[in-house]
Amino acid sequence: MRNWIKAGALAAAVVMAPAFADDASPVGLWKNIDDVSGKPKALIRISESNGVLQGKIEKLFRPADQEQNPKCDKCTDARKDQPILGMVFMSGLKKDGDEYTGGEILDPDNGKVYKSKMELADGGKKLKVRGYIGVPMLGRSQTWLRQE
């Protein structure tokens, strides 16, 4: 009987291993929570290519009386007047120990691009994202929640 229990536990661990492995990476779907209002703002898909992460906006949470597919009218780079939905707004992040650093993040609300870094928390269920000017002490942080 014990061997059956051990075999069942081992089989469950093997089947569940891929789900736990995903939590060790920020790749996936995240809900970002606005650091000012505390309310959900968007769903963001983080993907990886050759060890470099980027984030794309998949859905916006906006009141019904606001434009549901706004354009980045305050952007000053190639994203100027482009739809925010589907926009790559975060790029260039690479693993550096427990953090992902060296990237940049766009705030579509003001069109400004900031340096960025992020770090997984709570067993991979949360992502701490920081955008900053110059040094990380001068910036803003948000906590994003894993959706998959």
Image (spheres, rainbow, N blue to C red):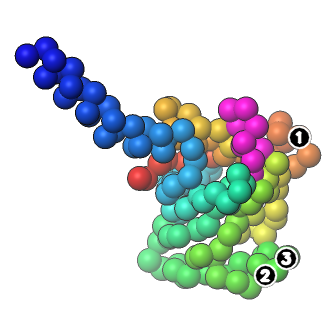
Q: Which of 117 and 15 is in front in this view?
A: 15
Is 8 located above or below residue 144 in the figure? above
Task: Write down the residue under mark 2.
Answer: 80
Could you tell me the amino acid type at mark 1?
Answer: Val
Residue lying furthest top in this view? 2
Asked whether the beta carbons under mark 3 and mark 2 sit within 8 Å of each other, the answer is: yes
First in sequence: mark 3 or mark 1?
Answer: 3
Could you tell me the amino acid type at mark 2?
Answer: Lys
Q: Can residue 140 be seen in this view?
A: no
The image position of residue 85, as x and y in percent, is: 58, 76
Residue lying furthest right in this view? 134
Magenta extent: 93-101
Q: Is residue 52 magenta?
A: no
Q: How many numbered markers are drawn? A: 3
Crowd tier of the residue under label 3, counting other residues whose Cα lies within 10 Å: few below 14, some 14–19, many 20 or above: few
Q: Dot 2 lies on which element?
A: loop
* Residue 77 badge: 3
Residue at 47% over, 40% down: 21
Residue at 58% over, 68% down: 57
Asked whether the beta carbons under mark 3 and mark 1 sit within 8 Å of each other, the answer is: no
* Residue 88 badge: none
The prevailing secondary structure element of the residues shown in magenta is strand
Q: How far apart are marks 3 and 1 (CA)?
A: 22 Å
Q: Dot 1 lies on which element?
A: loop
Q: Does the magenta stretch include residue 98?
A: yes
Residue at 82% over, 80% down: 78
Crowd tier of the residue under label 1, counting other residues whose Cα lies within 10 Å: few below 14, some 14–19, many 20 or above: few
Is 133 located above or below residue 54 in the figure? above
Task: Write down the residue under mark 1.
Answer: 135
First in sequence: mark 1 or mark 2?
Answer: 2
